[in-house]
Image (cartoon, helix red, strand yellow):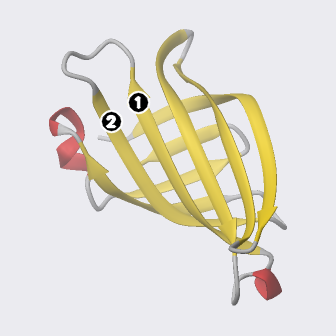
Amino acid sequence: MSLTYTLVRECLNNVTDVAGLWQIEGGKVMDKDNHIANYSSVKRVSCGTSEQNTAMLWITLFFIKAKPPENITLHGAHDFNSGGEIGSVSAASSAFAAHIGKQFKRAVNTLTIA
């Protein structure tokens, strides 16, 4: 079963430090018209990725109504040329454990885990 969500960005910060270039983003995760989670996204451009205009990517979805709290963590790559993101589910709490290892794709504000 695939999951498809809309990510609604509420903040975006670009930071440059000795470790490289960082882009930190966060906002709401929507399932149709329902706010079901919040997300945090971190992109890092470092040695070896700047030539390709790509970044390492971490995204965590924090589901807001679950007790105990549930989450999904994604790892992958962000392509600054296309804006696309790809990777896989690297960790998840019990409600989403079946998705570990599944691929994800983000195009603009649509995130699909299949």
What residue does disc 2 label? 71
Name the residue carrying label 1.
62
What amino acid type should be assigned to the residue bearing mark 2?
Asn
Q: Does 93 sit left or right of 32 as displayed?
A: left
Per the rendering, the mark at residue 85 is none
Query: Which sits in the foreground, 105 or 73?
Result: 73
Circle 1 residues within 10 Å: few <14, some 14–19, many ≥20? some
For the point 68% across and 74% down, which residue is it? 19
Give the residue drawn at x 70%, y 58%. 84
Q: Is residue 55 left or right of residue 16?
A: left
> Which quarter of the image is occupied by the N terminus?
top left
Circle 1: residue type: Phe
Few, some or many C-alpha atoms within 10 Å of disc 2 (few <14, some 14-19, many ≥20)?
A: many
Q: Quadrant of residue 15?
A: bottom right
Instruction: In this rendered view, identify the residue nearer to me: 70 or 34.
Output: 70
Left or right: residue 47 versus residue 2 is: right
In contact (CB < 8 Å): disc 1 and disc 2: yes
